[in-house]
Amino acid sequence: MVLGLVIALRGTTKNPPRWLDHLALVCIPLGFGYSLYDFGGITTINQWLEIGLVLGFLVGTYLLAKERASGYLWYVLMHVTCGWLMWIQGYPWLFLQQLVSLVFIVDAYLTQRKR
């Protein structure tokens, strides 16, 4: 998020500060590791789905900040795992919302690839 904020304040995606790039790459595994430590490992399918959701969001956002269309593919992972999680927990309307969101993600990905 800090990387995106600094890029927005600069008004350009050209040459973002390298320290922000390194900070993002360090914080993702640290956060994941702390989560594993805090919950005592991965013991349920819900935890796997939550990991997929968070990983899809973080990596997708990072790649989109770098103007890489592959970030949208990570968003697909995020929406699929979130939809699956909503289905397992008995929220069919939230599951359907994730499916509708996938349409927008695929459209954004295809639009970005055309450029």
Image (tube, rainbow, N blue to C red):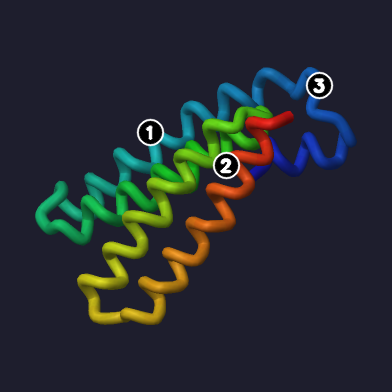
Label 1: which secondary element: helix
Question: Up-down: is 46 above or below 86?
Answer: above
User: Which amino acid, mark 2?
Assistant: Thr
Identity, as a three-letter code, of the amino acid under mark 1 = Pro
Disc 3 marks a residue whose amino acid type is: Lys
User: Label 2: how many residues lie within 10 Å, few (<14), some (14-19) or many (20+)?
Assistant: many
**Closer mark to the observer between disc 1 and disc 3:** 3
Question: How far across and how far down the image is residue 37, in percent?
Answer: 23, 46
In which image quadrant can residue 68 be found?
Answer: top right
Residue 23 falls in image quadrant = top right
Give the CA distance from mark 1 to mark 2.
15 Å
- Judge whether 17 appears above or below 77 on screen: above
Mark 3 lies on residue: 14
Q: Position of residue 5 (x, y in %)?
A: 75, 43
Q: Is residue 12 left or right of residue 100?
A: right
Q: Residue furthest left?
A: 43
Which is nearer the N-term, disc 2 or disc 3? 3
Estimate the x, y position of residue 65 in percent, counting from the top left: 66, 35
Q: What residue occupies the far right of the structure in this picture?
A: 11
Residue closer to the observer: 115 or 65: 115
Q: How far, Cα to Cα, is label 1 from label 3?
A: 26 Å
Quadrant showing the N terminus: top right
Give me the disc on residue 29.
1
**Numbered badge on residue 111:** none
Q: Earlier in the sequence, mark 1 or mark 2?
A: 1
Q: Quadrant of residue 84?
A: bottom left
Q: Label 2, on which residue?
A: 61
